Amino acid sequence: MNPADAMAVHAPVADMSLLGLFLQAHFVVKIVMVGLLSASVWCWAIIVDKTLLFRRTRAEMDSFEDAFWSGRSLEELFRSFNDRPATGLAAVFVAAMREWKRSFEGSGRQIQSLSQRIDKTLDVTIQREVERLESRLLFLASIGSAGPYIGLFGTVWGIMTAFTSIAASKNTSLAVVAPGIAEALFATAIGLFAAIPAVLAYNKLQAEVAKAQSRLEGFADEFSAILSRQIDERLSLAA
């Protein structure tokens, strides 16, 4: 019998379960695996949180649009939404109305450049809302792009360690080589496990942000036109 085969026969059977592969891995590979698993858990927490946030934002936007186009006066709507935290379309509406009321209630009654000030207020409010919706999405993009490479680093390190052990034992049988290679490749699998959902979720959530931004900008244009007509009417009456 070949001495190498004889050593393979008497060698202890390696645990090829997922837990066994993790426990048998080099400590550097273990750090990579734990880091990727932690990142995956955090990614899923972000995904769930953002999914619920966008669902709630869509519902709030629908509710506000129903109230806005129901025929109620702007003053009544402002009193209704000004007394509570406003997000989405309500935040855009409240910000513009506050600028409107400051201009007319101030001592100077400066309305000559009110349209420009309202447009700037709308732009700033929309940007803040978009930033709120986009918060923490960069983490998903980072894990989606870096996860496979981090896993590959663990794989390369594990393969180096496996070949070093093989060279020291002078045994190249499959029974000896396979466990070390499997442990190393397990790191790449975990990297892909973390990266693939992160990339898919990032693309989907970014599309939701784009839809919300488009809806905010559309409402801002319509509301700005309404206020602009009222400004023109007041200027014509004052002339």
Image (cartoon, grey):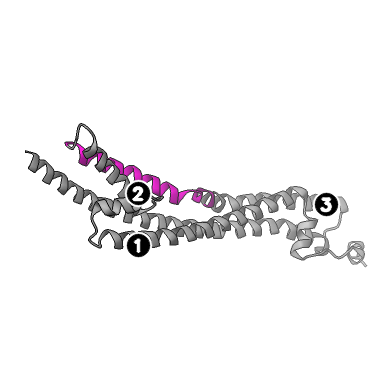
Residue flagged by tag 3: what amino acid is it? Answer: Ser
In the image, the segment drawn in magenta is 112-140
Point out residue 214 in the picture as x, y percentages from the top left corner: 32, 55
User: What's the residue at 89%, 61% (across, down)?
Assistant: 4
88 left or right, relative to 17: left
Q: Is residue 68 visible?
A: yes
At mark 2, the secondary structure is: helix
Q: Nearer the viewer, mark 1 or mark 3?
A: 1
Point out residue 181 in the picture as x, y percentages from the top left corner: 74, 58
Circle 1 Cα neighbour tier, 10 Å, few/some/many (<14 / 14–19 / ≥20): few
User: What's the residue at 37%, 56% (across, down)?
Assistant: 212
Residue flagged by tag 1: what amino acid is it? Answer: Ser
Circle 3 Cα neighbour tier, 10 Å, few/some/many (<14 / 14–19 / ≥20): some
Whether residue 175 is situated above or below residue 120 in the rendered picture: below
**Quadrant location, the N terminus:** bottom right
Numbered label attached to residue 165: 3
Q: Is residue 127 magenta?
A: yes
Point out residue 58 in the picture as x, y percentages from the top left corner: 39, 61
At mark 3, the secondary structure is: helix
Point out residue 144 in the picture as x, y percentages from the top left corner: 55, 53
Q: Do labels 3 and 2 touch, CB within 8 Å?
A: no
Q: Which residue is mark 1?
A: 63
Q: Quadrant of residue 100?
A: top left
Q: Which residue is mark 2?
A: 82
- Foreground pick, 172 / 130: 130
Q: Nearer the viewer, mark 1 or mark 2?
A: 2
